[in-house]
């Protein structure tokens, strides 16, 4: 009797495990989808899709370190999610355009997870860190199935402050220009460089940006 109870418990455990796995995959769509095959080595990016979830909290507080997931001030007050999406699209498309064209057609799907530029107070005093973070996955353009697993990218880098920021702006190096360039460089490193992008050390402020 003990033997049959053990077999029954194991079967029940397997059944619960399968249910949990299916539920997790459903909740994490669209990036968490069945894997088609390994990521191709030779890529031909046919399209770039960017999503900035409305669940990301926007902060307009003018503090040295405002809370929230999105902090952005260089565009007029408005739909910050749409503004961040436009910046990502510009950076990603620039980076993809500068890549060598491969042989395997793919679609690049990106979900922004954090976009924390500087408040006015931080920009013109101490500076800080641009926390630019996202997940991406490559898909078959015909079937929509995924190549490989979703990948998290931390593209954070140091932001100018004070007179350095003012001098940079006079040369056209605004926050938008620098962040767009960073995104373009990082996506090329991720898709073509050996080992992908290596996150920059950003110290204490960088650590705070993970909270």
Image (cartoon, helix red, strand yellow):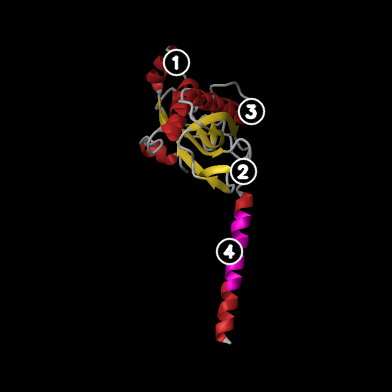
Which label sits on residue 169? 1
Q: Nearer the viewer, residue 99 or 160?
A: 99
The residue tagged with tag 1: helix, strand or loop? helix
Q: Residue furthest bottom?
A: 1
Q: Earlier in the sequence, mark 3 or mark 4?
A: 4
Q: Position of residue 59 (x, y in %)?
A: 56, 34
Span of residues in magenta: 11-24
Q: Nearer the viewer, residue 73 or 83?
A: 83
Q: Earlier in the sequence, mark 2 or mark 1?
A: 2
Question: Looking at the image, do the residues carrying marks 3 and 4 touch, with CB atoms under 8 Å apart?
Answer: no
Q: Is residue 23 magenta?
A: yes
Other residues around mark 4 within 10 Å, as few (<14) / some (14–19) / many (≥20): few
Q: Earlier in the sequence, mark 2 or mark 3?
A: 2
Q: Name the residue carrying label 4.
A: 17
Q: Earlier in the sequence, mark 2 or mark 4?
A: 4
How far apart are the alpha carbons under marks 3 and 4?
A: 41 Å
Q: Position of residue 56 (x, y in %)?
A: 59, 38
Question: Looking at the image, do the residues carrying marks 2 and 4 touch, with CB atoms under 8 Å apart?
Answer: no
How far apart are the alpha carbons under marks 2 and 3?
A: 23 Å
The residue lying at 63 percent from left, 25 percent from top is: 78
């Amino acid at each position: 009797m003990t033997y049959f109870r053990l077999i029954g418990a194991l079967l029940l455990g397997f059944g619960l495990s399968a249910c949990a796995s299916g539920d997790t995959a459903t909740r994490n769509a669209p990036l968490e989808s069945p894997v088609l095959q390994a990521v191709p080595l030779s890529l031909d990016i046919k399209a770039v899709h960017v999503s900035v979830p409305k669940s990301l909290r926007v902060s307009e507080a003018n503090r040295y370190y405002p809370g929230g997931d999105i902090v952005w001030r260089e565009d007029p007050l408005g739909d910050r999610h749409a503004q961040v999406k436009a910046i990502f699209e510009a950076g990603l498309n620039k980076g993809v355009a500068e890549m060598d064209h491969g042989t395997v057609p793919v679609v690049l799907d990106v979900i922004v997870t954090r976009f924390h530029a500087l408040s006015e107070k931080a920009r013109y005093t101490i500076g800080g860190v641009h926390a630019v973070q996202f997940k991406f996955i490559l898909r078959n353009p015909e079937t929509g199935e995924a190549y490989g697993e979703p990948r998290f990218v931390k593209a954070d880098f140091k932001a100018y402050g004070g007179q350095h920021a003012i001098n940079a702006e006079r040369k056209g190096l605004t926050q938008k220009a620098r962040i767009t360039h960073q995104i373009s460089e990082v996506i090329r490193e991720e898709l073509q460089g050996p080992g992908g992008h290596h996150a920059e050390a950003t110290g204490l402020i960088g650590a705070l940006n993970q909270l």
